[in-house]
């Protein structure tokens, strides 16, 4: 499938770039860089957001996250993942945010 050069998000969707995986276990054990299964945490940086969700009264509610913020995403939810690891998720699946937007 050909991927477009530009991607315009629709609706209440958010494009996320994964943060580097931690090579340290929750108990503090450090794994070598060659270790193939780093500890996976669903932490991402927001690349872009769609315009938001249209409410019943016709107004738009923008996503609660902004470009450049760091977010934590629910596990077990269906997301679209591109070959480079970038994910496309519904804004409702973001459960926490931190950091200043760009």
Image: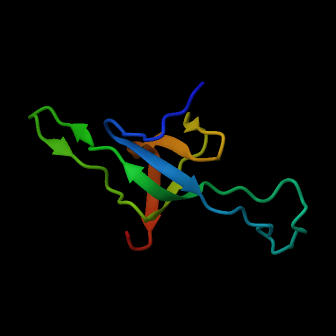
Say if 50 sits above or below 56 in the image.
below
Question: Residue 35, position in %: x, y?
Answer: 90, 60
Examine the rendered structure and indicate whether residue 71 appears above or below residue 24.
Answer: above
The residue drawn where x is 33% and y is 40% is 12
Q: Which of the pair 10/98 is nearer the observer?
A: 10
**Identity of the residue drawn at 86% across and 73% down:** 30
Q: Is residue 43 left or right of residue 22?
A: left
Taking 51 as reference, is 70 above or below it? below
- Quadrant assignment, res 42: bottom right
Residue 6, image x, y percentages: 43, 41
Q: How is the image coloured?
A: rainbow
Camera-nearest residue between 72 and 27: 72
Residue 75 appears left or right of 56: right
Corner quadrant of residue 57: top left
The outermost residue toward the top is: 1
Please state, as top left, top right, bottom left or bottom right, where the N terminus lies in the image: top right
Q: Quadrant of residue 92?
A: top left
Picture coordinates of residue 93, whole percent (x, y) = 46, 45
Q: Nearer the viewer, residue 94 or 44?
A: 44
In-image side of 70 versus 2 (left or right): left
The number of numbered badges drawn on the structure is: 0
Q: Position of residue 23 (x, y in %)?
A: 80, 67
- The residue under the point 57% across, 28% down is 2
Report whether 87 appears left or right of 90: right
Residue placed at 45% from the left, 51% from the top?
Answer: 94
């Amino acid at each position: 499938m050909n991927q477009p050069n530009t991607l315009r998000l629709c609706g209440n969707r958010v494009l996320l770039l994964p943060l580097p995986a931690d090579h340290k276990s929750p108990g503090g054990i450090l794994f070598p860089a060659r270790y193939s299964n780093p500890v996976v945490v669903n932490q991402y940086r927001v690349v872009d957001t769609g315009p938001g969700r249209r409410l019943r009264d016709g107004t738009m509610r923008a996503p609660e996250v902004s470009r450049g913020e760091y977010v934590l995403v629910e596990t077990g939810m269906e997301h679209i993942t591109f070959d480079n690891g970038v994910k496309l998720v519904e804004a409702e699946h973001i459960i926490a945010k931190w950091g200043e937007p760009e």
